Image (cartoon, helix red, strand yellow):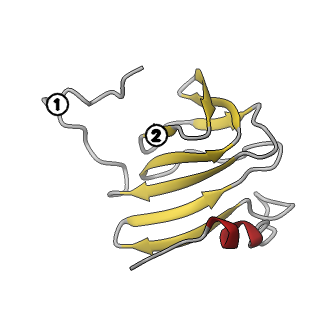
Amino acid sequence: MLKASLVDLLRRLPGPRTSNWPDGERFVEAFARGSLVVELYAPDGVDPQKPHTRDEVYFVVSGTGDFVIAGERRQFAAGDALFVAAGVVHRFENFSADFVTWVVFYGPEGGEKPKEDDGHATPPA
């Protein structure tokens, strides 16, 4: 069984300083298996991320703010789940100081292809 503790992962932030994260990385890997990677993400003030090469889902643990995806802005709050297809520009804005989210990357590089006939190719508004 793979298990991750929110409290333990938060203690590991900020992570190493890099050119993209001069004050230290604001994400930490919880675990990985096959194509699945689970991380905890807790940006501080600004969300500098760039589009990823794989599909991802965010599960908001705490906080509120705006989620901007492909130019569209939506409010989010704790308990929300947010899907982002591979390669799509997205970021969190105007988020509260307590904002923390799980992020799950999965599937092949370039993302999974939506089923044309399942009625769920585009998430509901």
Q: Is residue 45 above or below residue 15?
A: above
Q: Residues within 10 Å of mark 1 (few under 14, many from 20)?
A: few
Please name the residue shown 46% across and 65% down the image: 37
Please name the residue shown 76% across and 71% down the image: 11
Left or right? Give the position of 116 relative to 45.
left
Is label 1 in contact with label 2 (beta carbons under 8 Å)? no
**Disc 2: which residue:** 84
SS for tag 2? Answer: strand
Provide residue 85's location: percent of width, then percent of height: 41, 40
Point out the residue furthest to the bottom here. 1
Provide residue 36's location: percent of width, then percent of height: 39, 65
Kind of residue sitting beneath label 2 = Val
Of 123 and 72, nearer the camera is 123
Of 82 and 85, nearer the camera is 82
Q: Is residue 87 above or below residue 23?
A: above
**Disc 1: which residue:** 116
Point out the residue furthest to the right here. 23
Left or right? Give the position of 82 relative to 101.
left
Q: Is residue 54 above or below residue 90?
A: below
